[in-house]
Image: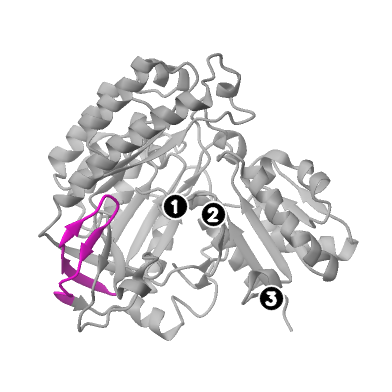
């Protein structure tokens, strides 16, 4: 019998994408997915180092497995991801029952490290300092029949003082456009309707190529995605205001399958705070981008990230943030209370604020944004929206007899199916009855229902393919030319607590 595995994921979409690759690697090596995570022969933690108390959450989960490991000594525990890249040998010292520690740059080594640890009967710790194999070239066990992540770059060249990602993910490395499009085409051929292009700084894509190929590379990539047969929705996350150019806005507006959605991290509305953060734009530039987006895409839903209580933030600085939020009218905002991250320059800055001050400002900001979000969603009442039906989006769907999905602009819609029997992966049209602060409700039944191949795959249980797929060897450097055009959205994790673990219940083939 094959050994079983479970992957528990913390953090951002990049980690979710990496976990799909870990699952694909393990299945290619002969492992099978465990029915219950605690019963698995191998448990892999894919960690995050960005959130406060990330290490406490990890060690709490590792402690839970310690007695199970004593009862089943053949069980193996592996820890990977950003926290593993940062803490290295510390993990085995604090949790000596861990068998394997690997970092963000050597995901591909997981099966080998597990086998080596089993053979040598000792912990294997392998952390490398630069990317060895681009994760998107590895086998994947995709989570969804209808939507998939596509990584176009890894790493980041920015030096934001609050962020530890560049130290853990390294300098930006870009995939060749042809390789990205090959993956997108493979997903669409498997029935996937929606892809999200991923990068730590997604719209800086192509800068390392140099010359003519770097000019407008991200806009060209968006337009090329518009030529992929069967692909209905394209999203991307996360862009940086510094690199957000008019050609990208034009590509969004003119490419029909690029969703009218944009996630643009603000971080602060105070120019003084932005300087201390080493963010290379100012509030006026940020608002000018939003104005240009809305002029070209009037119905665009725009979300953001905001940090409250950055060192040295004054009441005037915070009021400047509130002013930008009022003017920007974000659809929603992911707001964070600043906490020092060891290893970042901001952790050493003077002016660290008392927790009570940060909390009070945070509550004022979230109250304002709640009001704005609610008003924006109430404005959707009476509109007919196209919804891609999802599985697991609505936690109360069983009690309310509703189903859930996402509109093209990314809004969450809970709807009553009525006489229709849509499946996750199908597309329906509904009329919005009520706009709540964080979702829309449509209880009048389904107006139209289109069955899709993704819905067929979900219903049959085959998902998107019979086996994990690989897409060739990694390639860096100057890319091949983009294929010619022949015709013719950014969102962060919205599942709640980004540190909440989620077992990778992914499936063979493309997501």
- Badge 1 element: loop
| Residue located at (20% from left, 39% from top) | 293
Whole-Å distance between the Cαs marked 3 and 1?
33 Å
**Left or right placement of residue 337 versus residue 341 in this view:** left
- Badge 2 element: loop
In front of the other: 33 or 171: 33
| Residue located at (48% from left, 68% from top) | 143
Residue 402: x and y in percent read 29, 72
Report if the CB atoms under discs 1 and 2 are less than 8 Å apart: yes
The residue segment tinted magenta is: 426-448
Residue 18: x and y in percent read 56, 56
| Quarter the N terminus occupies | bottom right
Q: Which residue is mark 1?
A: 496
Whole-Å distance between the Cαs marked 2 and 3?
28 Å
Numbered mark located on residue 30 in the image:
3
Residue 191 visible in image: no
């Amino acid at each position: 019998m094959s050994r079983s595995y479970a992957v528990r994921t913390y953090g951002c979409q990049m980690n979710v994408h990496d976990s799909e690759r870990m699952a694909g690697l393990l299945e290619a090596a002969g492992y099978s997915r465990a029915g219950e995570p605690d019963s698995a022969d191998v448990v892999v933690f894919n960690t995050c180092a960005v959130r406060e108390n990330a290490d406490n959450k990890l060690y709490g989960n590792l402690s839970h497995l310690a007695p199970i490991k004593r009862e089943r000594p053949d069980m193996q525990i592996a820890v990977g991801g950003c926290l593993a890249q940062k803490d290295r040998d510390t993990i085995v010292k604090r949790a000596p029952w861990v068998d394997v520690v690997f970092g963000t740059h050597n995901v591909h080594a997981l099966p080998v490290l597990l086998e080596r640890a089993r053979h040598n009967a000792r912990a294997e710790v392998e952390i490398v300092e630069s990317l060895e194999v681009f994760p998107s070239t590895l086998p994947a066990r995709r989570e969804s029949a209808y939507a998939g992540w596509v990584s176009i770059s890894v790493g980041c060249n920015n030096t934001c003082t609050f962020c530890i990602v560049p130290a853990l993910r390294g300098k930006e490395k870009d995939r060749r456009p042809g390789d990205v499009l090959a993956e997108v085409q493979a997903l669409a051929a498997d029935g996937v309707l929606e892809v999200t292009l991923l990068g730590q700084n997604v719209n800086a894509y192509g800068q390392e190529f140099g010359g003519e190929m770097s000019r407008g590379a991200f806009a060209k990539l968006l337009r090329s995605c518009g030529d992929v047969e069967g692909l209905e929705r394209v999203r991307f996350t996360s862009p940086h205001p510094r690199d957000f150019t008019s050609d990208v806005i034009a590509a969004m507006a003119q490419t029909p399958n690029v969703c009218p959605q944009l996630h643009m991290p603000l971080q602060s509305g105070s120019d003084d705070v932005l300087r201390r953060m080493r963010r290379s734009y100012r509030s006026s530039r940020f608002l000018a981008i939003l104005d240009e987006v809305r002029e070209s895409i009037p119905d665009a839903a725009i979300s953001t990230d905001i940090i409250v209580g950055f060192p040295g933030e004054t009441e005037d600085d915070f009021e400047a943030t509130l002013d930008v939020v009022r003017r920007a009218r974000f659809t929603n905002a992911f707001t964070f209370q600043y906490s020092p991250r060891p290893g970042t320059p901001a952790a050493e800055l003077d002016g660290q604020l008392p927790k009570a001050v940060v909390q009070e400002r945070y509550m004022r900001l979230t109250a304002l944004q709640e009001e704005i979000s609610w008003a924006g969603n109430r404005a959707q009442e009476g509109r007919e929206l196209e919804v891609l039906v999802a599985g697991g989006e609505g936690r109360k769907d069983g009690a309310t007899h509703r189903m859930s999905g996402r509109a093209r602009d990314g809004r969450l819609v809970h709807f009553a199916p009525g006489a229709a029997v849509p499946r996750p992966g199908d597309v329906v049209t509904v009329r919005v009855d009520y706009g709540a602060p964080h979702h829309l409700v449509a209880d009048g039944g389904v107006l139209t229902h289109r069955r899709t191949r993704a819905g067929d795959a979900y219903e049959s249980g085959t998902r998107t393919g019979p086996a994990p797929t690989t897409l060739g060897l990694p390639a860096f450097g100057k890319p091949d030319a983009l294929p010619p055009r022949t015709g013719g959205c950014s969102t962060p994790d919205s599942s709640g607590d980004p540190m909440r673990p989620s077992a990778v219940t992914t499936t063979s083939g493309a997501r």
